[in-house]
Amino acid sequence: MFSDSLLERLEWDKENKNNSEAAEHVYMTCPNNGCVIEQDKKKWMNKHGKWIKAGQSIDVEGVITGTALKSSYASFWLHGCAASDQSWNDLVLKYLQAEAEYQATGNEQLLKTTTNVDQASPYKLRKASSDRNPNELMTRAETFNKHKLPLWVRFLTASIDLQKESFVVQVQGWGVGLECIIIDRFTIRWSNRMVDGERQIIDPAAYHEDWQVLIEQVINKTYQFDHNSKLSLPVMLTACDSGGQAGVTHNAYQFYRHIKHCGLAHKFILVKGQPRYESPTVKKSYPDSGTKTKANANGEIPLYMLNVNLLKDRVSSDLDRKETGSRYVHFPDWIGSWFYSELTAEYRTEKG
């Protein structure tokens, strides 16, 4: 939303979905009597306006009253509405374009820029403005048969988070406009390694062979449609974290070489988060053995760098959507309360 100074006083055609057309006619409503002030009166108002100090007020006759705050500093703050080189049409258009960007991607950068620079107002991050309540998300849970696909799902993706002694896997189904649903969530704790006839606990950092379980249990997994068990979809793409304890990155690269040899490289990618907000949303890179990790990548392993702040903003924006359809997130009722607590564990600050 606009800062109060703009939201309360500038008016435009808010019903028009075309941003350029909506911003064609912008006017101001007087805060005193509600009269309409057209943009061509701004120059006259700026010329005849008066500065007043903190603690003072001015009436419609131009009479200043009140006791001015005494200070050794002189500072002036003028909102963007009064800027001589900034038209109200431009202010509204930039806001509407920034709002559209936020609604489409969850990226607040344009909103922050136009608020700070064009409107000359402080910007408060929307993600920092309210704490998400896990119980509220739980009330959205819908009845879906566990591990079954709704008719509207078009493809599946899986994500893998590395823990010290496990792989945590989440499978999501995606529909038109990136409407999505949680299809599966499970933890892989046992490797195929045998000692004295017993399977051993997963150790992604120490044993590269432990990664082999991902092929059968994730990469090549398929899920049936609920309305017709004869129809199913495979996991189209699996994204796996490549960082963690010493040894994890090296074993992740070893595993990628293995699945490439098996002809499965098109179904699996390695990812790594980066915190800088100005970074690209996703960037494909090829680390080599000269990096500090010494993970022996040799420039042959594709690694996707993810802008985690921007992507988490987008997820948070999707969770704000109330109506089913594009980018709406469905929660099946078989997911426990722990999932919602995990989903709302982080909060947004100015730094990310």
Image: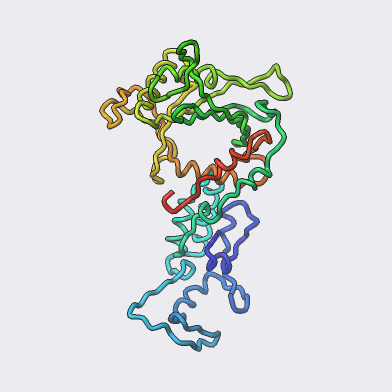
Q: Farthest residue toward the left?
A: 290
- Viewer-closest of 254 and 168: 168
Q: Farthest residue toward the front?
A: 196
The x and y percentages for residue 246 are: 34, 29
Relative placement, left or right, of 148 versus 198 is right
- Viewer-closest of 71 and 24: 71
- Viewer-closest of 302 and 36: 302
The x and y percentages for residue 76 are: 39, 74
The quadrant of the picture occupied by the N terminus is bottom right
- Viewer-closest of 67 and 337: 337
Relative placement, left or right, of 192 versus 10 is left
Residue 122, above or below 159: below
Residue under the image location 60 percent in, 49 percent down: 133
Relative placement, left or right, of 302 versus 198 is left
Residue under the image location 33 percent in, 80 percent down: 72
The x and y percentages for residue 297 are: 32, 23
Q: Farthest residue toward the right?
A: 227
The x and y percentages for residue 18 are: 59, 51
Q: Farthest residue toward the top?
A: 197
Residue 193, above or below 332: above
Which colouring convention does the figure follow? Answer: rainbow
Query: How many numbered markers are drawn?
Result: 0
Residue under the image location 50 percent in, 18 percent down: 215
The image quarter containing residue 96 is: bottom right
Residue 246, above or below 323: above
